[in-house]
Amino acid sequence: MDNLSFHDGNIFNLLHTRSQLPTHDFDQRLQLHSSMVRRLSQEQEMEGHQGCVNALAWNSNGSMLISGSDDLRINIWNYSTRKLLQSVDTGHTANIFCTKFVPETSDELVASGAGDAEVRLFNLSRLSSRGYDDNAVAPSALYQCHTRRVKKLAVEPGNPNVIWSASEDGTLRQHDCRESTSCPPAGSPHQECRSVLLDLRSGAKRALADPPKQTLLLKSCDISSTRPHLLLVGGSDAFARLYDRRMLPPLTSSRKRMPPPPCVNYFCPMHLSERGRTNMHLTHVTFSPNGEEVLLSYSGEHVYLMNVNDGTGTMQYTLGDIENFFSFSNILHDVGSQPQVSVTPQSGFHRNSNAATLKKCTELVEIAKRSLEEGTDVFYAIEAANEVLDAHSNDIESALKHECLCTRAALLLKRKWKNDAHMAVRDCQNARRIDASSFKAHYYMSEALQQLGRCKEALDFATAAQHLKPSDADIVAKVESIKRDLQAAGAEKNEETGAGTTRVLSLSDILYRSEANSESSHDMSRSEREDSDYDEELELDIQTSLSDDEGRDPDSNAMRGSLNLRIHRVGDDKPMENVVDNTSSETASSSQIDKTSYQPEGAIDMKRRYVGHCNVGTDIKQASFLGQRGEYIASGSDDGRWFIWEKQTGRLVKVLVGDESVVNCIQCHPFDSVVATSGIDNTIKMWSPTAAVPSIVAGGSAGPATANVVEVMEINQQKLSHNRENPLSVELMRRFRMQEYAEGNFHPFECTQS
């Protein structure tokens, strides 16, 4: 939608009024103004690593950039010259996943965390030269407390004494830089270290209703720059957790597993809180520059924005709200909903509205409706509706808002990208809130629920729509279609019941049960940890009986046939066989007691989502706020591109090619209009507003043509759905890669995909 204006206004008007604005405010507004974002292009490609670049971070004043790589080095780059200043041979024995400048140390202290489960601290002033090969330096501090990969480091602004590390062992640890080590002497048990700030080894939840049992493999953490006592963590389930460090218990050892401490808030989109799928997890969490919002990036999912402080209560939901969300009899509060208004569309306007805004919104709704009728440009029609509902929802009359909600719901149902049906449900419920007798809201709600497989609820809405328009042919056909689906589901259920079919465990179920019931991963030897580079350290023997096309459903990706899994952890003597669900009565009873006594917490729902990219291949993929005001959102993608959206509306602004394979890291300069990116390539790309002509979506000399963008995103959506919903194929690929490594065909510096 190139004809849509940007909400930060015209840059010439901003420049004209700069004398009337405080200097810092003007600089913040100018840094990544829409005019700058539209001119972003690749300025330089910096060479200096010999492996994938997994981590990027700026120092506080933006004069230097630090990077960490699979080549086991951290490099320091000069921002002004774009030249390599120092390259440090860290001594890590596995891929470096995170690195940071330690604040208030004149940029002399840097920290790194890696797949060898170690955190290392280096004093750059001890380096004798700038050469690449002769800069091996002993760390000034070495922390060997973790037992699995360290995926993220966090530092507190203004605090040079403490570093926090998040690991897949389920703990977040606090290290004092004034101590050379927090570990006992060599040869002592690792569990004797007393550095555990968060013990989440029994903290993961499969769903909001379930008690935490599984180890939460931590993938990311962040500390608020405006309120440093707030700590955000994310890992191997769908829930990001916000903690107040002032309320946490004292540091403890990891010898005894502690129950997870209470958190201030859970963050999770409502539609992701009930699935309980173990192959979906968070890869990155971060605070906004002002600390009022958080951004969550999911593997196998989209990027989501949430509010930290939900003062109105409209985004807080509980377990009961999830079922009510799909109910015909209840219109509950949900994300983005406004206070309930009269069921009769109002003719008045919001007091802040004006004629120009109303005209613009009316035109955008007409564009969206025309696209729906013609079945063309669905993506851009949705963006037009987003502009109306997300940017001007309070400025338009309720009748126009209702029309736009119904139109966007219909467009989402036509597009059918991942979770579009859930977004359509939200729009339909909001439309019902405006007009409880809306035929369109009930009709599209029935379609959305049918797509989600909720045929019983879908029939309720379809029947209501039929009562509103008895002679409408479409709704008559819809009712009959849903009834057929219900009959087919009932017949299938009766057939299974009559045959006495036992439920076969999915691989997802087996992995979850294996993780929940085993403690062995926490007692692995260091050599075993270093050899493994996968989420679940499991060996699988998979046997299937398929001949040619026999047993394969032509309409799905599912394989039918006999499947026998023998699963055991590395180092286990006895495999655990899983063919059918033979859970003992004692286990079931215990689980039932746990669920009965457990009181599920509430969670904060999504404020907005950002779609188009693909995140299924790596566990370090970032989503970041751009600029000091955080008015734009950026994320890397598995297709080698990186995407930029307008935060307020979710509108896709820019798509840029940043890597031959995968873009993982995106870090905006603290003050300048410059962005650094990295990924599978061995290089770091620097982006600045140097393009001769501004463009929207197209990337100038380094990006796809506008016409190809929707095609690119369609392919990404297919990957997003296919890879994460077929865990068997994922495990087969992992075993193939493990075999390659064993045979010497896996390059030691090749970037890991997990």
Image: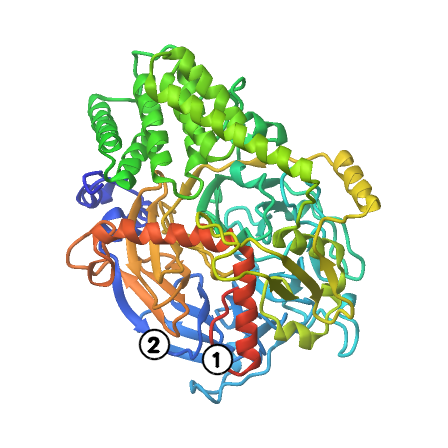
- Decide which of 703, 118 is in the foreground and name it: 703
Residue with the mark numbered 2? 83
Question: Is 722 positioned to the left or the right of 276 in the image?
Answer: left
Image x and y of residue 94, in percent? 57, 75
Image x and y of residue 701, in percent? 20, 63
Q: Residue at x 57, y 46 (%)?
A: 238
Q: Say if 550 sits above or below 739 in the image.
A: above
Question: Which of the numbered marks, if any, corresponds to residue 104?
Answer: none
Image x and y of residue 399, in percent? 32, 17
- Decide which of 244, 118 is in the foreground and name it: 118
Quadrant of residue 340 in the image? top left
Question: Is 580 positioned to the left or the right of 677 in the image?
Answer: right
- Few, some or many residues within 10 Å of mark 2 (<14, 14–19, 20+): some
- Few, some or many residues within 10 Å of mark 1 (<14, 14–19, 20+): few
Amino acid type indicated by mark 2: Lys
Of the numbered discs 1 and 2, the one sitting upstream in the chain is 2
Label 1 sits on a secondary structure element that is loop
| Residue lying at the far bottom of the rendered structure | 134
Query: What's the distance in space between the residues labelled 1 and 2, CA to CA?
Result: 27 Å
Residue with the mark numbered 1? 747
Question: Is 656 positioned to the left or the right of 427 in the image?
Answer: left
Quadrant of residue 93 in the image? bottom right
Q: How many marks?
A: 2
Q: Residue at x 43, y 14 (%)?
A: 436
Image x and y of residue 51, in percent? 44, 76
Amino acid type indicated by mark 1: His
